Amino acid sequence: MGRLSRNDTLRYINHARISCVPSVPVGDYVEATSPTLLESMGLGVATIATNIGGLKDVLNGSEAGILVPPSDTEALASAMDRVATDQGLRGELGKKGMEFVESKFSSRIWFKKLLRIYLSD
């Protein structure tokens, strides 16, 4: 696809059935929170990500997405197959993802956090 505008990127994500963020550590670098993960969840797309760094921090303990071990292609394929073939699971992950992003990462939430920083003594 090459480089896409933000609007085109969000349009493609919005039409996806599943969003995968299969990051792996590269040397000492581990992915921080992924905008793609949050955008996918916010758009109600069922999300699968690797259990590392910021991805783990976002999804761990929630039911808003599926975490798989990094570099475990069988676990990733199995999760993708399960979500692709189970419409109920896909819908539930999408719904919980949207709710999760709205409750933790929405612009309203971030605005309140920024206000607390600027208004604190």
Image (cartoon, rainbow, N blue to C red):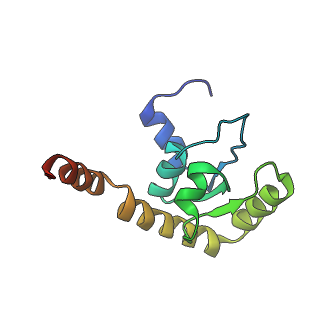
Q: Residue at x 52, y 47 (%)?
A: 33
Q: Residue at x 46, y 28 (%)?
A: 5
x then y, percent, for residue 86: 70, 71
Q: Residue at x 86, y 57 (%)?
A: 74
Looking at the rendering, which quadrant does residue 116 occupy? Answer: bottom left
- Marker count (numbered): 0
- Toward the viewer: 121 or 7? 121
Name above or below for residue 89 compared with residue 49. below
In the picture as drawn, the residue positioned furthest to the right comes out as 74
Q: Residue at x 83, y 53 (%)?
A: 72
x then y, percent, for residue 42: 44, 56
Looking at the rendering, which quadrant does residue 60 occupy? Answer: bottom right
- Relative side of 24 to 118, left or right: right
- Toward the viewer: 70 or 2? 70
The quarter of the rendered structure image containing the N terminus is: top right
On the question of residue 45 being in view, the answer is no
- Toward the viewer: 44 or 106? 106
In the picture as drawn, the residue positioned furthest to the front comes out as 121
On the question of residue 70 being in view, the answer is yes
x then y, percent, for residue 8: 47, 35
x then y, percent, for residue 75: 81, 60
Looking at the rendering, which quadrant does residue 48 occupy? Answer: bottom right
In the picture as drawn, the residue positioned furthest to the bottom comes out as 88
Name above or below for residue 62 compared with residue 26. below
Name above or below for residue 98 compared with residue 113. below
